[in-house]
Image: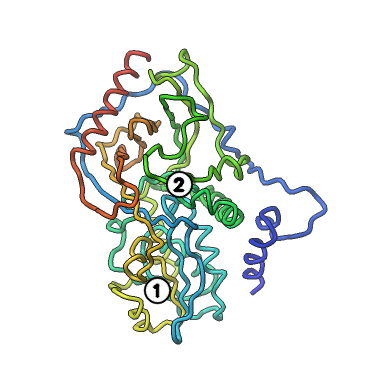
Amino acid sequence: MQRRRFLQGALGGGIASSLIGCAKTSKPVNHSLPLSPAGLPMQTGPLAPINAQPDRIISTNVCTRPFRAQGPRIEVEKSGNKTLIHNYGHGGSGWSLSWGTAALAESLITADKQTPLAVVGCGAVGLTTAIHCQRAGYKVTIYAKERPPYVRSSYATGIWSPDSRIVTLDHARAFADRWQWMARLSYLRFQTLLGLAGTPVEWTTMFRMADKPFDDHGGHNIPGEPPYPDYSKALLSDLTPKEYDLSAGQSPFNAPYVRQFPLLMFNISAYSQHLLDVFHRGGGKVVDRSLSSVDDFKQFGESVIVNCTGYGAKALLNDDSIIPVRGQTCKLIPQDEVKYGIQYFDQHTSVYPRRDGLLVQAGAEGDFNNPLANIDPQESVHAVEQLAKIMQSIKTRT
């Protein structure tokens, strides 16, 4: 119970005490990490061009991000003799906040250790929650209709984006402390995964481009979306990688405005398998089960159930607070020599150099509040063609 009181007290007492486990200290608290991302080397010299041709597309996928205006639902609900702990609604930040939200959810469990525990959902949040509960001493079974690589989380972009569609600006102040706590804990956990076999987590170099000054370039640049807080800039200044504005002479691209920065990236195929392996080594098992309504929770033998169903919670719980945000990606054949990515939100095109393929993300008007999971091949073809135009500029400038 001591650790649970610490977790709950950290949220009320502020971030300064939460990461060191002590609310009173005679020395100033320094949250800087031994290896700050600001000190990571930047990309120099010519960039290897991406072979951006539509005939190199090897897969196309669509995911539905579960966005809630007030932030994710992490709370306890009693249902008969069952205790439900809800842990869903993380927008585009599920992978990034997964370890922090897992710790928060586990802190709400009041059952004795070694109590059999059910986790519903086998995506980013479900897997990390199950592992965290295992490490806390619970015997955990995951119940899920699907498991990686066929869960929605497997179709995500897979980058460190802890404030991506996590809460609206209207609710930002109330959610700030909880978000910062989850983001910092998650970030520290990811540092322990660097250098593992299979490279589940690694740093890459990113170039962000814009057609107008960055100070005027907000959010995801898609009409119809609400404004979001820039939590990373405001609350993680000691963790957020330093960004460098490049002059025309420095930039390898023709875009009017270019920034360069290091970015933490998750190779989702390898990372998901790593999480599954850790869970199984801890004695966990995954059981196939489909749920269609909240009454289905009564069928569980476990008295404590952690609900990590993501977007599925909208139908399962009739939760109209969940707003779907459609996202389509495609993969190009991997290029080992490409060690950088691009974000060009004005052209609705981004690319990330994942090990399982160059992941091209196509943003489109109408994605917000769009529940359709249909694949539009032309959408990805257009994004790849836009990427090809950028590559033409890279060839002439390098």
Residue in the picture at 37% in, 44% down:
224
Mark 2 closeness class: few <14, some 14–19, many ≥20 residues within 10 Å: many
State the residue in front, 357 or 341.
Answer: 341
Please, is residue 137 above or below residue 355 in the view?
below
Q: Position of residue 375 (x, y in %)?
A: 20, 47
Kind of residue at badge 1: Thr
Q: Is residue 74 left or right of residue 302?
A: right
Please, is residue 306 above or below residue 348 in the view?
below
Q: Is residue 347 left or right of residue 169?
A: left
Residue in the picture at 44% in, 46% down:
226
Q: Is residue 149 left or right of residue 102?
A: left
Residue in the picture at 22% in, 44% down:
59
Residue 381 appears in which quarter of the rendering?
A: top left
Identify the residue under disc 2. 164
The N terminus: image quadrant: bottom right
Please, is residue 211 above or below residue 97 in the view?
above
The C terminus: image quadrant: top left
Residues under labels 2 and 1: Cα distance?
30 Å
Mark closest to the chain's N terminus, 2 or 1: 1
The furthest residue to the bottom: 81
Residue in the picture at 37% in, 31% down:
346
Q: Which mark is residue 141?
A: 1
